Amino acid sequence: MLANGDEAGVVAVLGVFAMVVAIVWIGTRYKYRSERLRTIQMVMQAGQLDENTRQALREILAPNALQRTRDGLIRSSGRLVAKLLFVVGWLTMVIGGVLFLGMLAMNGQSQDIEGAGIATAVGFGVVSLPIAMRELEARRAPVRP
């Protein structure tokens, strides 16, 4: 086992590593998209495309065209990730809650009680966050007549 101070250090290093990976990934995607759009823009400005090709490029570059393409990918992988996250959050909340109540009833050590309480809160947060986000999006959406 790690010493108490080592655990916090490992978590901090993993958090920083995850942030760096996310930043590099976002930067790479941005660079690739920018180059792709510049190439398409140069080809369209050159004027050597027939009307059917131009129309197809306009449809692809329309704001909601990417949404249609992403929807299929996100639905399949997004649902799986969401279900797994919900299951992990639910298990964390239930197991943490049982441990929390058990340690309270058995007069457990304060560090163990705090850990179980934190696990319960994290599990509750993971389970309730998607529901809260959906509710906020529904309130933010414009009202249609």
Image (cartoon, rainbow, N blue to C red):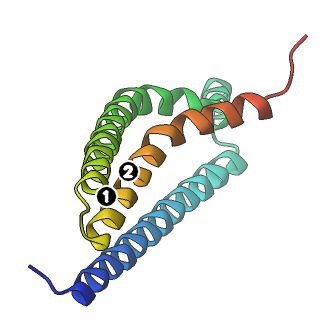
Name the element at disc 2: helix
- Quadrant into which the C terminus falls: top right
Measured in 3D between alpha carbons, the distance from the residue under mark 1 to the one under mark 2, in whole angstroms, is 6 Å
Residue 60, visible in the rendered structure:
no
Side of 62 relative to 9 (left or right): right
**Closest to the observer: 139 or 103?**
103
Position of residue 33 relative to residue 69, above or below, is below
**Closest to the observer: 6 or 25?**
6
* Residue in the image at 44% along x and 39% along y: 127
Crowding at label 2, few (<14), some or many (≥20) Cα neighbours within 10 Å?
many
Residue assigned mark 2:
120
Residue 38 lies in what quarter of the image?
bottom right
State the mark number for residue 53.
none
* Tags 1 and 2 touching, CB below 8 Å: yes
For the residue marked with disc 1, what is the amino acid?
Answer: Ala
Q: Position of residue 100 (x, y in %)?
A: 31, 53
For the residue marked with disc 2, what is the amino acid?
Answer: Thr
Residue assigned mark 1:
116
Q: Position of residue 99 (x, y in %)?
A: 25, 50
